Image (cartoon, helix red, strand yellow):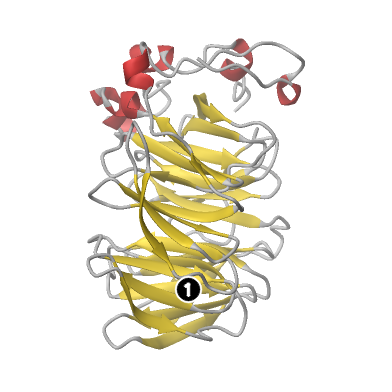
Amino acid sequence: KRQGINAEYGGDFPVEIYMAENEEEDKAPPEIQGEVTFFSLDFHPSIDLVACGNISGEVSIYQYGLEENQLSVALEAHSESCRALQFSPSGTTLYTAYADKSWQIFDINTNQVNVLFEKAHDSPINTLLCSEDFQTMIFTGDDEGTIKAWDSRSNKCVFSFDVCSEYISDLAFQKHLLFSTSGDGFLSVMDVRKRKIFAQSDEDLEDEMLSLAFMKNGMKLLVGTQEGFINIFTWDYWGLYDDRISGHPMSVETILTLTDRIFCTGCSDGMIRLVQLHPNKLLGVVGEVEDGSIDDLCLSWDNTYLASIMGNAIKFWNIKFLFDDENLNEDSDEDEGQGSLISKKQQEKLDKAEPFKNFFCDL
């Protein structure tokens, strides 16, 4: 049980969030405390490891557990912050990108840096992506709107896109298309096979785009914005969103897909929300931090833990109960408009405060 929150929902009142029926179900690894701010994190795809990078350019890999988190590897620090990192789908490699314009390939088995790409960009790198569809291709985006594609077999940049004039905030991959969001409010779509910009959103979307996530078998793209909206684009219609989820009081820093119609959001108001798509509905609040922002979210390989960056700490949340019921994965279109996709038992373990029930009542 957790308590807190008020102003954004109409006054002071206690809020109770039930995350589990007993303490055993609610257990999670202790926080990872750092001396400086964390910028990036990712879970290993098959074992209990989590990697995190900080503002000082340090990258650490921890073996997490209920009793303690043990430092397994500490990579040699770069001169500037580690802004992005990701394990490869196989888990044998960790890719890390830095504000000093470099990125590198780290071998998990040998604990050695295989390749360091110095001066990979002309400006600081802000985001990185390795897709399961193109596992030999790594994409990096920088602070001046340039995206580069790297072939891990030849260790070379094979092509690049100049998609905008401000920072690339997030990257996503679907089918053969690469998607990016940026600080100047553009959603850009690039055809990797043809190596050209395929589409771009209209210029009148005057809001910073911060985060990306695909839903409904890739047919819906969710874009989190600085103003707290989640814009919803339909496949092949990238000029303008055709639906929008409102209600987040501050910027939507990150979106994490759980199923085809259920996702989590990390907001700069310090709250992690569980949200349903079509019908749009807030299902509850997974976690909350005081005096901080939720800057990144990731899900453990066994769907047990949700991890979030909160300043100089990595916080773990036990959300296994969400995956214990078959109802969570019943994502057919037949259920649209029929209410909540989670079971009564799961809903009871989420927030039961009336303000949260009414959070999306006008959608």
Of 94 and 131, nearer the camera is 94
Q: Position of residue 255 (x, y in %)?
A: 50, 45
> Residue, x 44% and y 41% (percent of image)?
307
User: In this rendering, is residue 145 above or below 69?
Assistant: below
**Quarter that holds the C terminus:** top right
Of 23 and 236, nearer the camera is 23
> Residue, x 24% and y 25% (percent of image)?
326
> Residue, x 33% and y 31% (percent of image)?
66
Q: Position of residue 182 (x, y in %)?
A: 62, 64
Q: Position of residue 63 (x, y in %)?
A: 32, 47
Residue 116 location, quadrant = bottom left
Of 151 and 47, nearer the camera is 47
User: In this rendering, is residue 263 above or below 360?
Assistant: below
Residue 3 location, quadrant = top right
Give SS at disc 1. strand
Residue placed under numbered mark 1 in the picture: 140
Quick one: label 1, few (<14), some, or many (20+) residues within 10 Å? Answer: many
**Amino acid type indicated by mark 1:** Thr
Residue 171 visible in the current orientation: no
Q: Is residue 208 left or right of residue 93?
A: right
